[in-house]
Image: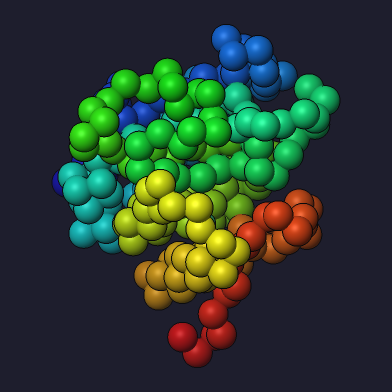
Amino acid sequence: MFAGDVDAFLGDPARLLADDGSDLDYPSDKPHLYTLPAVRERLRPVLGLLPAAVFECLVKERKLVILASASPCEPWKGSPGDVDPIAHGSYSARGRYLHDPVMFRLEFSALDPPWVMKLGRIDVELAPPDVFAGVLIHECMHVYLDHNYGPLNPDRAAIQQREDEALRCACELGFRPQTAAYVRYYSERFARPDLIIGRLPSNSS
Ligand SMILES: [Zn+2]
């Protein structure tokens, strides 16, 4: 029954969207990774690992929408072949994230917006399976914990606190291996001062 819920979610065109970036002038050279069947195949086994109560919260209370897109957040001034950990990373936001043009193509109620999870080029195109799982679970934790900044412009300490909390929650739910893979991957390949990554809790927690 739970697997059926995941399939129902993934089969709903209002809940899962994908684009290869070509119509916003940032085409991926791997468009086959952005077809709905390809995205579904990768999401299904990971979402199926979530506790039923968590997945139900994401779907019913947070009204989760997942968008896999090669289109970058702005401002981004890199060359077309480069990937950038922020412009092409993944994130989640309640309603529209104003610095991402692709968000303006989604239609939803301004009064009661869904949580939107964007999966960017790094995770769709480059991340190995354990990292992809770690990122997806991590973003699910932000949504589950309702980490909504709203109109606030949070400082680094506030962001760090929420990143740490999301990692801790994932580890408590049994996703420490995937979470560690995600943290290691981003820390080693994309370390940058403006990229704030959560800190893994100690093994005892
Ligand atoms: Zn995060």
Q: Is residue 156 left or right of residue 154?
A: right
Q: Quadrant of residue 23?
A: top right
Q: In this view, does 90 lie above or below 121?
A: below
Q: In which quarter of the image is residue 116?
A: top left
Q: Which of 97 and 59 is in front in this view?
A: 97
Q: In this view, does 183 lie above or below 33?
A: below
Evaluate whether residue 32 shows in this view: no
Q: Quadrant of residue 24?
A: top right
Residue 126 location (% of width, % of height): 69, 39
Name the residue at 44% across, 52% down: 152
Evaluate whether residue 90 shows in this view: yes
Q: Is residue 197 left or right of residue 36?
A: right
Residue 14 location (% of width, % of height): 29, 24
Residue 190 location (% of width, % of height): 76, 52
Residue 3 location (% of width, % of height): 26, 44
**What residue occupies the far front of the structure in this picture?**
152
Q: In this view, does 9 lie above or below 81?
A: below
Name the residue at 70% across, 55% down: 194
